Amino acid sequence: MRHIPIKLGPLAMLLTVISVCMTTLGILAFATARADWNMAQKYADTIQTRYALEAEGQRFLQTAALALREGKAPEELESAERDEAGTVWRTFQEGEFMLKVGIVSEGGQLRVVSWRMQKEWEPEGDLNLWLDD
């Protein structure tokens, strides 16, 4: 029986390339998962803040309705302001988010005329799209 020598050069090269590719894909998968986790945490914090503001706004509406039933005007509530059109405004703020609620008293009932959630935003740089050369 004759012994045929096996050349390991091409096989070793193939295994090296496969190992490098698998390592690269593993690192990329980990980096992507970490970025997704960070984005999910940021989104969860944002939603939690928005829901907290929504709950405060709902409590304000409940307090205003109770005050109206007791014969008090909604603008007499804490931090409420009335504008010249008769709309009573109340602003709630938490972090960068702000909820502005506007209500009007009509015939012994409240009507919400504005419920606006806003976030403060400042551009990072100059937003000039037209370069002056």
Image (cartoon, rainbow, N blue to C red):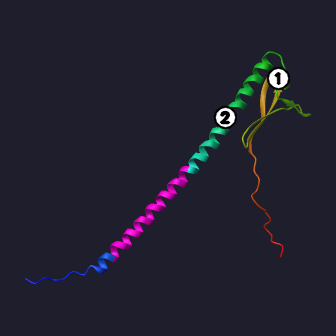
Residue located 51% across and 58% down the image: 31
- The quadrant of the picture occupied by the N terminus is bottom left
Q: Is residue 82 above or below residue 118?
A: above
Number of residues whose C-alpha sits closer than 10 Å to that of mark 2, classed few (under 14), some (14–19) or many (20 or more): some
Residue 66 disc label? none
| Disc number lying in front (2 or 1) | 2
In the picture provided, is 81 more to the left or to the right than 48? right
Q: Which residue, as the protein is rendered here, is positioned at the far left? A: 1
Magenta-drawn stretch, dominant element (helix, strand or loop): helix
Q: Position of residue 46 (x, y in %)?
A: 64, 43
Number of residues whose C-alpha sits closer than 10 Å to that of mark 1, classed few (under 14), some (14–19) or many (20 or more): few
Dot 2: element: helix
Whichever of callouts 2 and 1 sits on the residue coming sooner in the sequence is 2
- The type of residue carrying mark 2 is Ala
Q: Quadrant of residue 67?
A: top right
Residue toward you, 98 or 33? 33
State which region is magenta.
Answer: 13-37
Whether residue 15 appears in magenta in the rendering, the answer is yes
- The type of residue carrying mark 1 is Gly
Q: Position of residue 40 (x, y in %)?
A: 56, 48
Residue 52 disc label? 2
Whether residue 33 appears in magenta in the rendering, the answer is yes
Dot 1: element: loop
Q: Position of residue 14 (x, y in %)?
A: 34, 75
